[in-house]
Image (cartoon, rainbow, N blue to C red):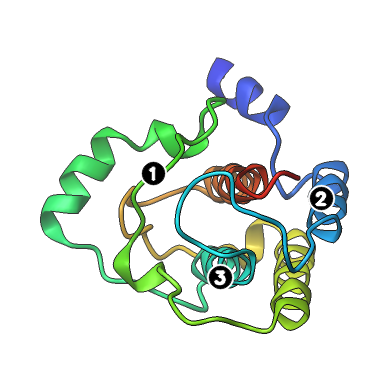
Amino acid sequence: MLETIKKQKMKNLFNENDTKAILARIDNLKSDSPGLWGKMTVDQMLAHCTAGFEMASGKKNLPRPFLTGIIGFLLKKVYSNEQPFRKNSPTAPSLIITDHRDFEAEKQKLKSAVIDFQAGGEKKCTTHPHPFFGKLTPTEWSIGVHKHLDHHLRQFGV
């Protein structure tokens, strides 16, 4: 019960105000926004974050390696707790974007993905396990994708 109450207070993308705030931050990105850490360019980050929403909505289902699954289960709370993700956190190789993309097109794709995720709510959230953290509830997905997006928006100074 206490955990449920805590999660309700945490920022998540099922909350309309949290979604509006994230969209405003995305709008503040510029094509030349420099990364404060990591190797991604801003256009690569946008595409990477869109891929995260494709996982959360079930449009992209990544395999779950056995050993990663065991470690991920033990670290599952990291995905949906109040602590921001660390700088330079590891990512699934299939979510690493190495080619350059059209900034405006990627920005619009990400904004659409955020809006669609929020509008779909819990019913449209995937039941496929996260490739690292395993089975997540819709609330955990919503908090996790917010944290992930917040992490990368901070990476680019917005």
The answer to which of 15 and 107 lies nearer the viewer is 107
Q: Earlier in the sequence, mark 3 or mark 2?
A: 2
Q: Secondary structure at mark 3?
A: helix
Residue at 63 percent of width and 71 percent of height: 43
Q: Earlier in the sequence, mark 1 or mark 3?
A: 3
Q: Earlier in the sequence, mark 2 or mark 1?
A: 2
Can you say which quadrant of the picture contains the N terminus?
A: top right
Left or right: 101, with 32 as reference point:
left
Mark 2–mark 1 CB contact (< 8 Å) = no
Can you say which quadrant of the picture contains the C terminus?
A: top right
Residue 151 circle label: none
Residue with the mark numbered 2 = 25
**Mark-to-mark CA distance, 1 and 3:** 16 Å
**Mark-to-mark CA distance, 2 and 1:** 21 Å
Q: Amino acid at mark 1?
A: Ser
- 56 w.r.t. 105: above or below: above
Answer with the quarter of the image where residue 84 lies.
Answer: top right
Left or right: 134, with 77 as reference point:
left
The answer to which of 158 and 150 lies nearer the viewer is 158
Q: Residue furthest left?
A: 67
Residue at 40 percent of width and 65 percent of height: 128
Left or right: 3, with 86 as reference point:
right
Residue 89 circle label: 1
Residue at 17 percent of width and 62 percent of height: 65
- 128 w.r.t. 75: above or below: below
Q: Secondary structure at mark 1?
A: loop
Residue at 73 percent of width and 63 percent of height: 114
**Mark-to-mark CA distance, 3 and 2:** 17 Å
Answer with the quarter of the image where residue 75 lies.
Answer: top left
Q: Amino acid at mark 3?
A: Gln
Residue with the mark numbered 3 = 44
